[in-house]
Structures are given as structure tokens and as C-alpha cells.
Image: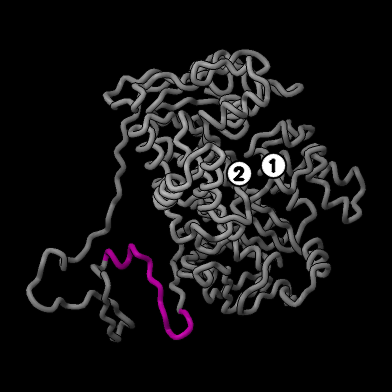
Amino acid sequence: MSAVVELRDVFRVHPSPEGGIAALQGLTLTVREGEACVVLGPSGSGKSTLLRLVAGFDDPSAGQVRVAGVDVPALDEGERARFRSRVLGYADQHYWRALAGELTARELVGVQLGLAGAARRERKRRADELLERVGLAARADARPRELSGGEQQRVALCAALAHGPRLLLADEPTGELDAAAARDVFALVAELVRERGTTALVVSHDETAAEHADRIVHVRDGRVSDEQVRAGGAGAIVVGRGGWLRLPEELLRGAGIRDRAAATLGPAGLVLSAPAPVGPLSSDDAPAAPVELRVAATRAPHEARNGAGRAGASVAESQSSTVAGADGGRVVVEARAVTRSYGEATPLVDVTARFRAGRLAVVTGPSGSGKTTLLHLLAGLDVPTAGEVVVDGIALSGLDRAGRAELRRTRLAFVGQTVTLVPFLGAAENVELALALRGVPHDEASERTADVLAAVGLTEHARRPVAELSAGQRERAAAARALAARPLAVIADEPTARLDAPNALALGTLFAELARTTGTALVCATHDPLLIELADDVLSLGSP
């Protein structure tokens, strides 16, 4: 089988005041015709950079990138655009960029087919087929503003697939989908690979992606660390140039190997083991057993009357002994019998919920259940069709747009699915700018910024332009900007959607700890089980 994607010893270095940060460090990867290859790795490991190089949006600092036999870096901008339209289907992690607001979902899916000269009937047939396969047949006539983030993400993926590309590139295609919808999307990609002979290169931190892959490649620190043929198959450790091996940490821990290893060549092959200790054996020298991480979190009982985005869903009052925050658990944000309609669509009907100081509350439910709609109402970014939203005792219905904006500046912080950081500024500058707009003195702002970036693991990248950060790093930077403001309430929409499990757990733990120690009310829409497990209160939207 011929190779569709060939990367050889690829480096990608982003300039920085400290001298440059390497996103890829000698990565080598081949993806063959008709193969579904999933690249897994933690936030910041170089996954998105890999896709951008293959698509010709970035150039390598060193190494070779060939796609469908074409030397992509050698093409000029016009040639690259024509190459992408002819060969690629690209589903960006910033899916909203591909969705023109004036077009319906059906029209958006058919755009690329139209550019290729397909007749209107064919465009409609193909669009309806794909939308039905991702559960959006009933939303074909909806425009992007009427769709949830997860629904928009599925429309963008269908648009990337509609013209039957030779190579599909998908960057975190299920970041904002619940588990069931994510499995449906990955199954669709796998089916199309087999039906049409499409080659797929999908990057993700979601292990669900591996269930439908022909090959799973793990990337860490900008290199391929190991790969596996089909989920559950035997893994292969990649040998780098010069004979370097990178072994999974769980293997090293299980063998009792820490900072040194002994290598011996015998009849059975190469054997790695922990070297014999020198001198008296201490407790630290004992072979290490695999480590199991357990998270204990106090979680209040919760209820959801009449279910999802429908009449009377509410957060139950806590019955636990968890200590409330500095404000004694008073109600900071409240939705009173809120309904929101958009034309014929009504994502929220008669929802009532109270969110208290010093508590982490999550809003859950399947994609399209109204989570984002509710959060926009709570933050005053939208107004209900019926009912009332009250923030710190102030009814939002009595405020105009400027009044709601002022309330957000002084009392709330909002983190949306679309991260709105200034791209040419660093993470630290984005946080400092937000604090300056809130009137925080410079010295205090600098101190807060350093503390919060350290808390979300971005100290090393603090001065790097946001445009050069991975999606997960940008998500953490946006959360840091909100937390640094120390508002009465932080409202965050899918804050861990693009984070791997360790970073999601770290951010969720930080949210829970800050709520309880500072008295801030934290409200997150999420389908992430790690964040749900850490929550004090859970509001479930969707069918019971």
C-alpha cells in the first residue's frame, strides 16, 4: 500500500523570548492509503502542529513533509490552497471558523461539493445523508447560532467529509461531544474510510478514538513514543535515530526502573531491568508497583426534575458536610423558570437552578440539550424568552446590553467554548490585560498572573504568543484569565473539552479548591466525567 502521509525527522520550533520552543522534535510518521490512524497524546505534545504541517498551514523548521506524493513545504500559497481543496478534508479544532453564519447546516455541508461543481440535488442528498449519520437530520435547516457547540462540531466534520477527500485530517473532532455522540462520530469516520477508501489521520486525547483505528500512534514531547496496530493489539516501541528508546512510564514503574536501567542481551533478546542498588538498601530502592490514582470528592445529592433542558431542572441543596466558601454558600447566580427559544427551536424550557458561593456546580447533558444556552443566559450574553436570571441580587431583565457587560466586568468571568484570547499576546499578557481592565494595580496583577499560570501549568509558556499554543494550552490560559479576576462567579463552557485526563483532573481540582477557599461560585457545562466527579452540585439537562 502506498504512503499518503510521510513525515521524516520533522522539527517545528516556535520562536520565543527564551530562544524558541520545539513543538515537534524529530517526529517520523507514515500513514498508508486507506488507513485510519489515530494520534493520541497529552495537551501540548505536538498533535495539532503535526496536522497543520500535513495540511500546509505551517512549514517545518527541519525535516520532510510529503502528502499524496507532494512536497507540501515546496508549494506556494496558491498551490497549497488548490492542493487542500483537491486532496484534503480538514476538520479544525476551531470548528466555528468553517461555519458561515448565514448558511444552514445542510448548505454548510454542501459547500465543498458546490465548489467542485456538484449539482444542487446531489449536494442536498449528500448533506442529508451525513447529517443523519451524526444524528442531526432534524437540524438540517438550522443556522450555526441555533446549534450547540457539539452540534456545530458535527456539522463541521460532515462538511470536511462531504466531497469524499483522499485524506481526512481531524483535530480533536469530538472535544465538545458527550461519550455517545463521540463514539458515533468516530464510527462514522471509520465507516467512510472503509466505504470510500479515504485515509484518515485523527489527533485526539480521547481514548475512544482508538476503538475504530487501524493504528494508534502515541506522541509525547514532539516525538512518536510508541504505536499499536488496532485497539487491544500488541504495541511497538519506536526506535529513534541513534538508538534512542522511549518507554511508557507504566512499564518502567512496573519494572521498578526509576532514573537508571540495566540492559542485557541474552538468548531471549534485549532485557531491561532495574540496576542492582549500590550500598545499603533503603525504602526508596524497593521496586515500584504500578501507581493507582484515586480522587476523593465530596458530592452533594442532586436531582433533575423532568430532565434536560426541560421544565424545572434544578440543582439540589447540599446535604453534605462540605464547608461552604467565604460567602457562606449564598446564592450568587439564579435561573428562575427560564425558557429560551430560537425560532421553532426551544433548547431550554422552564429551567430553575441556583448556584451558590463556595461550590463547584456542573451542568451536564448530551450535545444539544441546552447547556451552552443556559450558561449564556447566566452570564448575560443572551436574554431568556421567558423567566428571569438574577446575578448577585440583580435581575438581568432590568439591564440593557451595556449594563450586563458592566455586571460581567465587575462580578462575573466567562470562559466560552470559543476561546477569545488576544492571539499575538502571550498567556501572561492576556491575563494582565484582563486584570488591568478590571482596575487591578500593576504589581498585584503581575503577582496574580504568575500564581494562576503556575496553577494551570503554563509558567513555561507564559510569554509565548497564544496563537502558537495548543488548543489545550489556550483552554488553560482562558481559565487562568477568568480565575485571576477573582469574581463572584466563574461561568465556564466545556473548560476541559480539549484537555487530556491529567490536565483535566488538575484543572477540575483547581476549580473545586478555589471555589471552597475563595467563596467563588464556579459553574461549568461539561460532559467530562472527571469534572462531574469533582463537583459539589450537578444539574442534568436532557431526557431523563
Task: Give the SS element for disc 2.
Answer: helix
**As drawn, 2 above or below 453:** below
**As drawn, 280 above or below 411:** below
Does the magenta portion include 369?
A: no
Judging depth in this view, the residue of 83 and 437 nearest the camera is 437
The residue that mark 1 highlights is 133
In this rendering, position of residue 86 left or right of residue 402: right
The chosen color scheme is: one colour
User: Which residue does the image show at 50% across and 29% down from the upper left?
Assistant: 363
**How far across and down, in percent of the image, does residue 178 sit?**
54, 39
**As drawn, 319 above or below 482:** above
Q: Which residues are magenta?
A: 240-254
- Measured Cα–Cα span from mark 2 to mark 1: 8 Å
Judging depth in this view, the residue of 222 and 157 nearest the camera is 222
**How far across and down, in percent of the image, does residue 224 sit?**
50, 70
* Type of amino acid under label 2: Asp
Does the magenta portion include 241?
A: yes
Q: Earlier in the sequence, mark 2 or mark 1?
A: 1
* Type of amino acid under label 1: Arg
> Quarter-wise, where is residue 278 in the image?
bottom left
The residue that mark 2 highlights is 184
User: Which residue does the image show at 80% across and 61% down from the upper left?
Assistant: 85
User: Which residue does the image show at 56% across and 58% down from the upper left?
Assistant: 469
Q: Main secondary structure of the magenta part?
A: loop
User: Which residue does the image show at 45% across and 71% down from the upper left?
Assistant: 236
Quadrant of image for the N terminus: bottom right
Number of other residues with Cα within 10 Å of mark 1, as a class: few under 14, some 14 to 19, many 20 or more: some
> Quarter-wise, where is residue 348 in the image?
top right
Circle on res. 316: none
